[in-house]
Image (cartoon, helix red, strand yellow):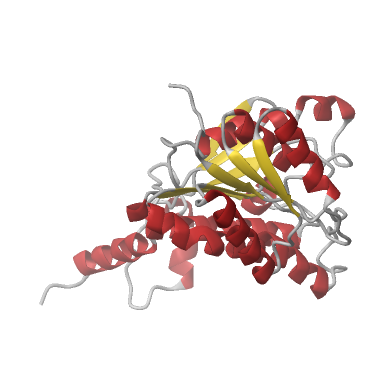
């Protein structure tokens, strides 16, 4: 079945360049009305200009689609509320939110200023929170919503010099997991994308041969799938150069150790078995972990 977005309204943040531009164009090409959001600042988040967003909106409109530009800063909750209000006034609904706005302020943790840590968190985490909160009630009321958070391999696995960026990207996984549970009965599906693409954020990090393979447009099909009517929910999709994979967070089966209390020496002696991931499981909620430990402890407790 062909994936289409006719009559759907999408907001894409950070859509003036790179991945966001590709996502906005991809959604529009398949029928979505698109709000092209981009502050138009530098890579570190400084400065602003509406021109980046306007260029992409103009490109969509010239191709026969429908779009308008918005230069709101996603870190400004009031500005985001105004953007969503304008969208609802114009189109009457919001079906899709692609949280893609991003900045970099890389530096080793020893040299990083706390202000740079906070600013990156404000854009990536609070920016996604502001946008998601602004559309949440509309999506609940219309019983339909598709939301994407842009995470990163840096957040999933770590990357030297990106403590702020990695912390922000990892935080979005926790946000996705919880909102998946809260949005399920309202047909709101939430997913995360871990993209690898040649953008202004990566152009200094990889050789030219690799950059030639990592076109942002090669990632966008994954976004279109995750934003579709029959999309899954709570998926972390890795994408780049035409390759796609799903990242799973699993917990080992673990062991119930004897002793009250258990000694750290006992943990050390059994650690290989405790960490054995052969029978690992992707838990579906925080209480599932609690239930596992409590159930196992009750079974091991002396019978009176």
Give the residue furthest to the front.
90
Residue 270 in view:
no
Q: Position of residue 94 (x, y in %)?
A: 52, 50
Q: Nearer the viewer, residue 35 or 161?
A: 35
Give the quarter of the image for residue 28: top right
> Which image quadrant: the C terminus?
bottom left
Give the residue furthest to the top.
1
234 in relation to 129, above or below: above
Q: Position of residue 155 (x, y in %)?
A: 65, 53
On screen, residue 159 versus residue 31, left or right, reads: right
Q: Position of residue 167 (x, y in %)?
A: 67, 61
Q: Nearer the viewer, residue 119 or 110?
A: 119
Give the quarter of the image for residue 42: bottom right
> Which image quadrant: the N terminus?
top left
Residue occupying image coordinates x 81% and y 41%: 55
Residue occupying image coordinates x 55% and y 55%: 88
35 in relation to 61, above or below: below
Residue occupying image coordinates x 47% and y 22%: 2
Q: Nearer the viewer, residue 185 or 58?
A: 58
Give the quarter of the image for residue 16: top right
Residue occupying image coordinates x 33% and y 77%: 260
């Amino acid at each position: 079945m062909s994936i289409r977005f006719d009559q759907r309204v999408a907001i894409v943040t950070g859509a003036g360049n790179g991945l966001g531009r590709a996502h906005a164009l991809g959604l529009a090409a398949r029928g979505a009305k698109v709000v092209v959001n981009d502050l138009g600042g530098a890579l570190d988040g400084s400065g602003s200009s509406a021109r980046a967003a306007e260029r992409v909106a103009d490109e969509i409109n010239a191709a026969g689609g429908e779009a308008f530009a918005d230069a709101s800063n996603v870190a400004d909750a009031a500005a985001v509320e105004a953007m969503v209000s304008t969208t609802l006034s114009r189109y009457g609904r919001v079906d899709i939110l692609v949280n893609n706005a991003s900045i970099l302020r890389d530096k080793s943790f020893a040299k990083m200023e706390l202000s740079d840590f906070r600013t990156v968190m404000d854009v990536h985490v609070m920016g996604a929170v502001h946008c998601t909160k602004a559309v949440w009630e509309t999506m609940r009321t219309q019983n339909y919503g598709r939301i994407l958070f842009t995470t990163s391999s840096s957040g999933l696995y770590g990357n030297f010099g990106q403590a702020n960026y990695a912390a922000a990207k990892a935080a979005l996984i926790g946000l996705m997991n919880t909102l998946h549970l809260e949005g399920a009965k309202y047909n709101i599906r939430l997913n995360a994308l871990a993209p690898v693409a040649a953008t202004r954020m990566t152009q200094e990090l990889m050789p030219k041969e690799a950059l030639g393979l990592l076109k942002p447009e090669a990632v966008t099909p994954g976004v279109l799938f995750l934003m579709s009517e029959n999309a899954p929910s709570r998926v972390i999709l890795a994408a780049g150069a035409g390759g796609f994979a799903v990242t799973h967070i699993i917990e080992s089966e673990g062991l119930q150790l004897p002793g009250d209390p258990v000694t750290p020496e006992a943990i050390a002696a059994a650690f290989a078995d405790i960490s054995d991931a052969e029978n690992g499981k992707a838990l579906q909620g925080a209480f599932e972990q609690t239930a596992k430990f409590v159930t196992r402890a009750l079974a091991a407790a002396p019978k009176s």
